[in-house]
Image: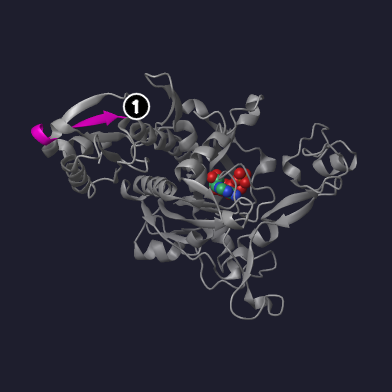
Amino acid sequence: PAPNIETIAQLAKRRGFVFPSAEIYGGLASSWDYGPLGVEICNNVKRAWWRWMVYERDDIEGIDTAIIMNRLVWKYSGHEDTFSDPLVDCRACKSRLRADKLENHSGLPIEQAIAAGAVKCPNCGSTDLTEPRPFNLMFRTQVGPVAAEDDPSALAYLRPETAQGIFVNFLNVQRTARRKLPFGIAQIGKSFRNEVTPGNFIFRTREFEQMEMEYFVRPGEDERWHDYWIEQCFNWYTGLGLDPKNLRLYEQPPEELAHYSKRTVDIQYRFFPEREQEEKQWDELMGIANRTDFDLRAHSKGPVDAEGKRLNPDSTEDLSYFDEATRERFYPYVIEPAAGVNRSVLAFLMDAYTEKESERGEKRIVLRLHPELAPIKVAVLPLAKNKPEIVRMAKEIKRMLQPAMRTVYDDTAGIGKLYARQDEIGTPYCVTVDHQSLEDEAVTVRDRDTWQQVRVKVAELTEHLKKRLNL
Ligand code: ATP
């Protein structure tokens, strides 16, 4: 694996995976643009997830909901009140800090520890810190031409999670797809959080993409399904090549749990292998939460308080479920596996990174990406670019392969350099057209991981590669 995130950030920029956003204007803190290879690997991760979640199962439907929704969604989901981080300012160096991430060995709650001078600013060491105050992470915007300051009804938010779009559509999907419990709804899309401390390349940004699935179950069966999804998700990552040694499960302690969660287990990846303390090497890749019936209940018109007053006077629907078999009506419980596309891409890139020595003793970078994730599956390379017949044949082979797999043609360097370039971006196979190809209608297929070469007839090439790429 890569020794640190920085190694991947440099490779990503050099080879066209990820660029700092709007760099010609000095960029924007923690905003990134995905280049020709970056967009491919992101799409491949999303496609793999969708295939696994939606196509290869019988119990999950897909959906794609709006990023800007009625503000009431975020009122009743609890995000307006509670989706915030505790913010602290360092008076000495003016850094903005997250109170919950500060080192606190005093045994006191963080507010008291700060007041007692027991907590240091990680940037300058000062203990002159402000009291923590809640900072809401939702991006605010306005709908229509009147500013939200002048007309509060114009206030809207960019969604901070895709999940709520699923909950408010629970009945739409359940009815139109005629679903019975247990079943799930999956969504992939952008989410936005005005993070206090974004950073570490694409690990934490203010704009990112999520892959979320809400799995609706009978209350009482939730714990079993929670365990099931934890295992499934772990296996999804290892099945796509992540080394289990760099993954672990982390049980969130009660004080870390989100307002809706009964239990949350994170799949963590070793994003920071360079850190001395083993405990600090890990961070969240994906969270799997038991959200109970919190959200469906909160968005329903039915529930009332002790005086019989509706808890949600705005909703026009009751998002409960009627079980035909038992003649019972209840609010389903929800198990939610929630992953980040960008964070997953970072983990896949880090884990695939290897350095190898060539026969000439040069250091070579090889990205051993799972073929399904590799941005380019095959590169067709002519051995001599001044031979028109060879070039023509190579281009024809590229055209032959491209409907079945992402293929590129490259003749802008000598063969050694061309191989090295493809290794560095994780291309599983290179196809080389040489002088002999003109006579025997065969080409050389070179394997990225073993550097072994085999001779394959052009007529059999598509099938040969499809089989190896599992297409
Ligand atoms: P963290 O504790 O790292 O802030 P979280 O617990 O708030 O994350 P969730 O709300 O569980 O994150 O979101 C699910 C997934 O979405 C995360 O596991 C992560 O992969 C991704 N994610 C969340 N916030 C960001 C972000 N700011 N940038 C990139 N990915 C993110």
Residue 94 horizontal/vertical position (percent): 81, 49
**Quarter assignment of residue 151:** bottom right
Asked if the residue at label 1 sits under 8 Å from ligand 1, the reply is: no
Residue 109 horizontal/vertical position (percent): 81, 40
Residue count near mark 1 (Cα–Cα under 10 Å), binned few <14, some 14–19, many ≥20: some
Q: Which residue is mark 1?
A: 449
From the viewer's perspective, is 58 left or right of 236? left
Residue 39 horizontal/vertical position (percent): 42, 50
Front-lying residue, 381 or 90 = 381
**Quarter assignment of residue 235:** top left
Asked whether residue 294 appears in the rendered view, the answer is no
Question: Does the magenta-highlighted stretch encompass residue 440?
Answer: yes
The total of numbered circles placed on residues is 1
Mark 1 residue element? loop
Magenta stretch bounds: 438-448
Kind of residue at badge 1: Asp
**Quarter assignment of residue 158:** bottom right
Write the residue at 46% across / 45% down.
Answer: 17
Asked whether residue 128 appears in the rendered view, the answer is yes
From the viewer's perspective, is 135 left or right of 106? left
